[in-house]
Image: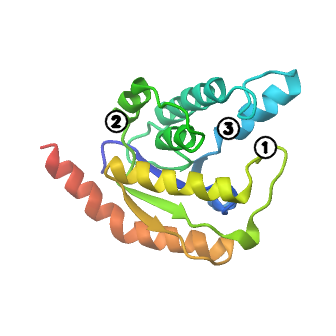
Amino acid sequence: MNDQSIKIIITGGPGFGKSSIINQLEKLGYRVFHEISREIIQYEQKIGGTRLPWIDHHAFNDAVFEGRKKQYELANTPGEIYFFDRGLPDSLAYLLADEKEVPEEHFRETRKRPYFPVVFLTPPWKEIYQKDNERWEEYNYALKVHDNIRAFYGSFGYTLVDIPFDSVENRVEFILQYLKNEIPLITQKMRDEHL
C-alpha cells in the first residue's frame, strides 16, 4: 500500500479539453479538484472585484496559487488517487505567458509540493476551442500558455504525456490505462528511493 496520496495533474492550454476530462473522471467516481481560477473569476465578477486576470494579473495569480496550494494539501489520503485540473506549475506558466515576473517564493513553494511524476497534457485543439465568461484568452495566447506549461513542467522534472485527440470518454480511458501500467512501477520506485 502506498503511504502517500497519488496526485495526478491534467493540464494544457485553456480550451483544449482538460476540464471535460476532469468532469468525466468525477462522473466515474474519481476524486478530482476542479480549476480554481474559474471559481475566483466567478466570485470576483459577482462582487465587482479586481482580482481578475485582465485587471490585476498578479493579485489574480496569487489567489489562484494559494487556492492550488489548498487543493494540494486536501489531497492527503494515503494510497488515494486524486486528479487535478491544473497544478502549481501552471500558475508560473501563466505569469510568464503574460510577461510578468514569477516570484521566487512561488518556485520554492512549488518544489516543496511534488505531484505524480507523469503529467497528462491536452495538446492544442483549435476545433474545440471556445471562449466564455471565464475563458478570456484568444487562441494564440492559449498556445503561448500551452508552450509555457510544457516548459515549466519539464523544468520541474515531470514526464509529459500528450492525451490523444478523441472523444472525452476515450481520452479518459487512455489516461486510466496508462496509469494502470505506470502507477505500480512508479510508486515502487518512489518507495525504493525513500528507503
Q: Is residue 161 left or right of residue 168?
A: left
Name the quarter where the C terminus is drawn.
top left
Tell me how far mark 3 sits from mark 1, CA to CA.
8 Å
Q: Position of residue 15 (x, y in %)?
A: 70, 58
**Within-10-Å neighbours for mark 3: few <14, some 14–19, many 20+:** many
3 and 10: which is toward the camera: 10
Q: Mark 3: which amino acid?
A: Ser
Q: Which residue, given by chain and number where applicable, does mark 2 sit on?
A: 111
- Give SS at disc 3: helix
Q: Residue at x 55, y 33 (%)?
A: 100
- Give SS at disc 1: loop
Q: What is the total number of numbered labels drawn onto the structure image? A: 3
Q: Are marks 3 and 1 in contact (CB under 8 Å)?
A: yes
Rendered view: 150 above or below 49: below
Q: Mark 2: which amino acid?
A: Arg
- Give SS at disc 2: helix
Q: Which residue, given by chain and number where applicable, does mark 1 sit on?
A: 134
Q: Position of residue 105 (x, y in %)?
A: 41, 24
Between disc 2 and disc 3, whose residue precedes?
A: 3
Between disc 1 and disc 2, whose residue precedes?
A: 2
